[in-house]
Amino acid sequence: MIAPDRSATVGIGGAAAWIGALGLAALTIVLYLVGDGPWPASAIVRVGVVLCALAAIAWAMQRPRPTTGFAAHAAYVVSLLVVFFAAGGPDATRELWRQAAFVAVLAAAAAPLPVPVPRGALLGVHVGCLLLVWLQLAGPRSAYDTVGRAGFYHALEQWSGYPELGLLMAVATCAMVAFACAARPPLVRVAAAVLALAFAGATVFLRSRSAVVAIPIVAAWLLLVAAVKWRSKAAAAVLVLGLLGATVVAVRAGGVTALMSRAAGTVAREAAIREQGWHAAREMFADHPVVGVGLGGYRREYYERRLGADGTHAYNIVLHVLAESGVIGLLGWLALWGRALYVGVRHAGPTPRGAAIFALHGVLVMFLVRSQSEHFLANLMTSDRMLLLLALWMGLTEGLVLDAARVPAPPRAQRGE
């Protein structure tokens, strides 16, 4: 009686896993390439989330069930629930539903499926969609972003403006830099480097200054990891060349003092745009340090305090979390991000799976660095899609790690020990 039951369970789990994997691929395409309209985009996204959830169900049906990373994700969920019940607020329910969709997609993308679903192909879908967004940048149609900057491409009509498009091109750049660092075949490295240059060029074309500045910062981190973790001479050489290039630029610009003076002026201009949001978030956190003003409550609190006209978000992801959910929310947020970033370095390696993990690590680090001057997950229309994309990036990282953990280690003789 045991064998038939187990066979049926495996069959149902396998079917759910494949449907969930197809749902993940379909959801990825919709998120990148379908516009912000309420219909049919919103309906397609909801269907994609439901289909993705089948992968999480397949995970739950496994015996024994893998639970690696469960503590960090559970801490995040518990912190959301504590803030929801403690702070409440008229916007809390919508934000909780958004976070529920985020957790469901993350779990689906991370699920160690009972059938050999090609998880690397899911990462390939992301790269392909980012290339399609890149190809739209020189499209024939004219549009304007939310602050009036003109562009001749379709992609601007699908996202709220330059910041989101600049973020997509920047994360693609860092993903390709990381892949070039970890991949071993020379042709793959060259292809990744070419794509990284193409995506970086698109970031410059979009005039997304913060994204352009963030790219060399994240690239230096990725090269440093490769140089230290794998003793990569190529990564170390690129770091040295980058340092020499920065020195030459500083000298030609009139020296370090002149360059720092220009940088200080640029920082002052950028900070002036964001200072009101930073100040508002600090005030909210000071008044409600434990659980914040409530999930999704930043905009309401901002306008109730009559702090100004721009109450969309705090222009900083950490300050926004502190304002809306206080220390409790920040602890859960740190657990989630700490886990995602740790495994991205710990399990990266010069193998196909390790290179994919490192590429996703580059994406997440870029997202986090860029989010220090913009909050892409605020309770807005486009941010719903960005939140689900983040869930896919985090979930695929965790899923690749879980897949690697289930593969038996090669015998010592095969490892050359």
Image (cartoon, grey):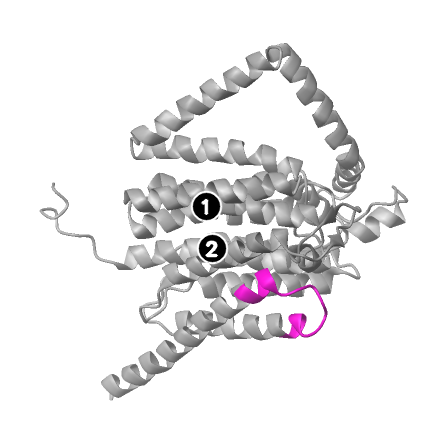
Q: Is residue 356 above or below residue 66?
A: above
Left/right placement of residue 227 relative to residue 159 reads left
Left/right placement of residue 277 relative to residue 21 reads right
Q: Nearer the viewer, residue 83 or 61?
A: 61
Q: Nearer the viewer, mark 2 or mark 1?
A: 1
Q: Residue at x 51, y 75 (%)?
A: 51
Amino acid, disc 1: Leu
Task: Tell me how far mark 2 sits from mark 1, CA to CA.
Answer: 10 Å
Tell me if residue 341 can be seen.
no
Q: Secondary structure at mark 1?
A: helix
Query: Residue 44 sits in which quadrant?
Result: bottom right
Q: Which mark is residue 127?
A: 2
Q: Is residue 241 above or below residue 7?
A: above
Q: Quadrant of the C terminus?
A: top left
Amino acid, disc 2: Val
- Judging by the rendered image, the residue that carries numbered circle 1 is 195
Other-residue count near label 1 (Cα within 10 Å), few / some / many at <14 / 14–19 / ≥20: many
Q: Nearer the viewer, residue 216 or 357?
A: 216
- Residue 244 among those drawn in magenta: no
Q: Nearer the viewer, residue 87 or 105?
A: 105
Residue 236 in the image: state x and y as whole percent: 36, 26
Q: Nearer the viewer, residue 73 or 37?
A: 37
Residue 10 in the image: state x and y as whole percent: 32, 79
Q: Secondary structure at mark 2?
A: helix
Q: Which residues are magenta?
A: 29-43
For the image shown, how many numbered marks are present on the structure? Answer: 2
Q: Which mark is residue 339?
A: none
Q: Residue furthest right?
A: 306
Q: Earlier in the sequence, mark 2 or mark 1?
A: 2
Q: Are circles 2 and 1 on residues that touch, CB within 8 Å?
A: yes
